[in-house]
Image (cartoon, rainbow, N blue to C red):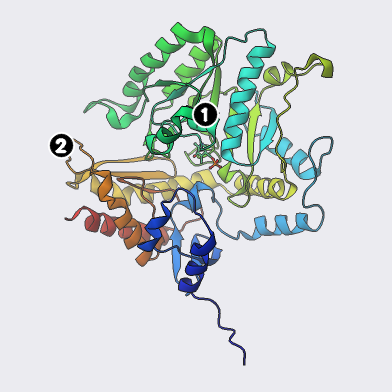
Amino acid sequence: MPDVSPPRNDELMQRDLRHLWHPCTQMKDHERYPVTPIRRASGVYLEDFEGRRYIDAISSWWTNILGHCNPDINAAIKDQLDQLEHVIFAGFSHEPAIALGEKLTALTPPGLTRLFFGDNGSSAIEIALKMSFHFWLNSGKPGKKRFVALQNGYHGETLGALAVGDVALFKTTYAPLLMDAIMVPSPDCYYREPGESWEAYSRRQFAHMERVLAEKHDEIAGVILEPLVQCATGMRMYHPVYLTLLREACDKYGVHLIADEIAVGFGRTGTLFACEQAGISPDFLCLSKALTGGYLPMSLVVTSETIYGAFYDSYESMRGFLHSHSYTANPLACRAACATIDLLQQGDWLTRNRATAKLFWDGVAPLQDHPHVAEVRQTGMITAIELVKNKQTRQAFAWQERRGMRIFDYALSQGALLRPIGGVVYFMTPYIISPEQVQQLVRIAIDGITLAVAD
Ligand SMILES: *Cc1c(COP(=O)(O)O)cnc(C)c1O
């Protein structure tokens, strides 16, 4: 008999490490921490090659909202696969993209009616930055070529996206390659005074933005920010009033508002789009991650007819937006996106999520009294616990101690994928998570925190 026993985790890990280079990873770490090969997934669970299951508490990098191997999304992709897998999108079109345009523009904030496709989040950011600059160029204002962004923001890893982001760990090395963006202090409410409300603090922080726009609007094309939650820098949160004020100021000073909802779109913050909580429409809405339910790489920049109109002219005018990606509007990804939107509309997910979020909150709120917890915060389906060395001064643990890794390790051993960002432990689960699974995650996180802060 030939040996047909399936490969084990160890064997796959060794094969992986021979040829592959993983993202956001110092590969030498894998001498100590294993790569976990995943054989299959279903609902909130990932399963490895030895049959161990892990609750995906971070939605596989914030992409999955309706569960792994969701039967309806699977069926849509399989159906599409037998009709059309891909076709050039310049000069050609197909039903999945057309249907996505119709479905999505019925849901996006008012005035956002025009879709341009990219194939990952960072490329959507590049597209929005180029379009914004190019709009002003086409409008006879070539001097408007700088971008304003928030401190502690994150917009992806390609050079334009990195330039408007502010994560030193990712950015410093490449600084010589990056355009010079104007960084403004964040409305991040972690820094509010004791007793100060989120609203008061976010409003107060807007003064920095107002000043920059008042002084430099002649050279500014747009402001880019993550509405409500700065995810990659530890799920830092702020009040919607900041977005309302920003919309007013952008209109006043003639500057575009670019909303990066790549992580927070599709219900994550409690509304379908985070901008809704401020009652605003951005000039550019960047979407990706949950756009395809977490299935396939695709992104979108959704913009207005005003922006579109500034590019619409004879070919000879040379005003067109000639940007392209090979896999623009991939039909399989468009079908996954359509199925995701249909499911979001059929189920009452926003209501269900409010109940789920309350379970998370009730589970971890007692940690507010923990001697190493500076803050427990929540916006919609994002709940975060900020660990510190010193509760009074809020001094963080030294990053070299990598206490978050202890929690990651412990959680894996207990059947959960938790992946703290520095000292911030967070839940950002698929919406389909059950109350029992929430309880289980809360228990694992609390025990993991206890272990991680002990010396
Ligand atoms: C993930 C993310 C991006 C980048 O998307 P990629 O698909 O990883 O390139 C941009 N902005 C925000 C807010 C993100 O969370």
Q: Is residue 297 above or below residue 32?
A: above
Left or right position of 58 against 289: left
Q: Is residue 124 visible?
A: yes
Q: Position of residue 185 (x, y in %)?
A: 36, 22
Q: Position of residue 359 (x, y in %)?
A: 37, 51
Instruction: Return the disc, 1 or 2, that comes first in the chain's sequence.
Output: 1
Q: Which mark is residue 275?
A: 1
- Front residue of 437/57: it is 57
Left or right position of 39 against 386: right
The amino acid type, in three-letter code, at marker 1 is Cys
Q: Position of residue 7 (x, y in %)?
A: 53, 76
- Front residue of 55/124: it is 124
- Front residue of 182/231: it is 182
Left or right position of 25 against 199: right
Residue corresponding to mark 2: 392
The amino acid type, in three-letter code, at marker 2 is Gln
Label 1 CB, ligand 1: below 8 Å? no
- Front residue of 344/422: it is 422
